[in-house]
Image (cartoon, rainbow, N blue to C red):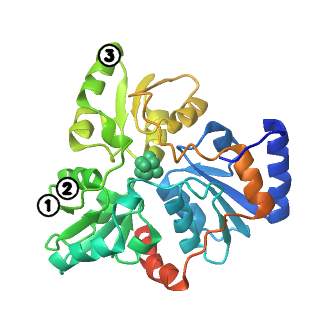
Amino acid sequence: MSCNPNLTPQELREKIAELKQKRNAIILAHNYVLGEIQDIADFCGDSLELSIKAAENTNADTIVFCGVRFMAETAKILSPGKKVLLPTPDAGCAMADMIDLNTLNKIKKQYPDAVTVCYVNSTAEVKTGVDICCTSANAERIVASIPAEKEVIMVPDGNLGANVGNALKRKIIRYNGFCPIHNRFTRQMIEDRRREFPEAVVIVHPECAPDITAAADAALSTGAMLGFVKNSPAKMFIIGTEIGIIYRLRKENPDKIFIPLTEQAICPDMKKCELFDVYIALRDMKEEIILPQEVIDSARGAIEKMLK
Ligand code: SF4
């Protein structure tokens, strides 16, 4: 977060709109970022939707990515000809940082015939060492597409790996990474919320531990949550994911009620980007995501395979 001593939110929005035109830029934002950023984004979505958007051959010269570093890196890998800007260069992902290429290679050595599936929440460097990427929206489909006789390694999220393994009744060789925000949910929280709001539908994210996804009514990516809520006759929902999604859920469903499973489910990195940061990013064209060409070439295959 940069310091903004002088400009009002309205002035910042106007300056951003002017600069966006001047730079021929689009703004992509993850569903977890602050509401003020979701409101100015050209497109909000989950990791899969944002990857697809980044891969689209839009006329934009610049992508301003409001989210965390691995997402901006994915956009750069898919659109290497565009300038990709990350307004908050220190916005990382605790889960992505739990594994590096060296560690991945050691695991692969233990299972030389296995297919390696990598959650998109991983560094560009790790993506260079895997066969195919997945997101929380398509992880089951990706693993199901791998022949049954093949062993499957999933990194870095152990919870996602366990949830996919349970759903497909398939053994998955899992790494023990996790999202600290989703890992803090407990069964007790679900029981307490159900007691408070017995008519509410409980939706959690597949990054939650298997006992949490089993205790919920549905485990969905944030993009799928939006579709589920829209089509559901229910009026009240308990949301077990980073609370940023609740801003969009409320905006798109003003007649429905959304209760966080816990108010503490806040990812500090997702909350770093403010209007002033987007303004500075477009004004000064920074921080630009620069990746070595060999990393782009080598990581792109795994992401494109997923998108196909
Ligand atoms: S919510 Fe979890 S997985 Fe998502 S960016 Fe934050 S730490 Fe990473």
Mark yes or no: residue 281 visible: yes
Contact, mark 3 vs mark 1 (Cβ under 8 Å): no
Is the CB of the residue bearing disc 3 within 8 angstroms of ligand 1?
no
Crowding at mark 3 (Cα within 10 Å: few <14, some 14-19, many 20+): few
Q: Position of residue 9 (x, y in %)?
A: 78, 37
Q: CA distance from mark 3 to mark 2?
A: 30 Å
Q: Which residue is situated farthest in the bottom direction here? A: 294
Q: CA distance from mark 3 to mark 1?
A: 35 Å
Image quadrant assignment for residue 289: bottom right
- Identify which residue is drawn at 68% across, 49% down: 41
What is the secondary structure assignment of the residue under circle 2? Answer: helix
**306 or 123: which is nearer to us?**
123
Relative to 117, 83 lies left or right: right
* Amino acid type of the residue tagged 1 in the rendering: Lys
Q: Earlier in the sequence, mark 3 or mark 1?
A: 1
Instruction: Point out which mark residue 171 bears.
Output: 1
Instruction: Point out which mark residue 198 bears.
Output: 3
Q: Earlier in the sequence, mark 1 or mark 2?
A: 2
Asked if 180 appears above or below 149 in the picture, the reply is above
What is the secondary structure assignment of the residue under circle 1? Answer: loop
Crowding at mark 2 (Cα within 10 Å: few <14, some 14-19, many 20+): many
Is the CB of the residue bearing disc 1 within 8 angstroms of ligand 1?
no
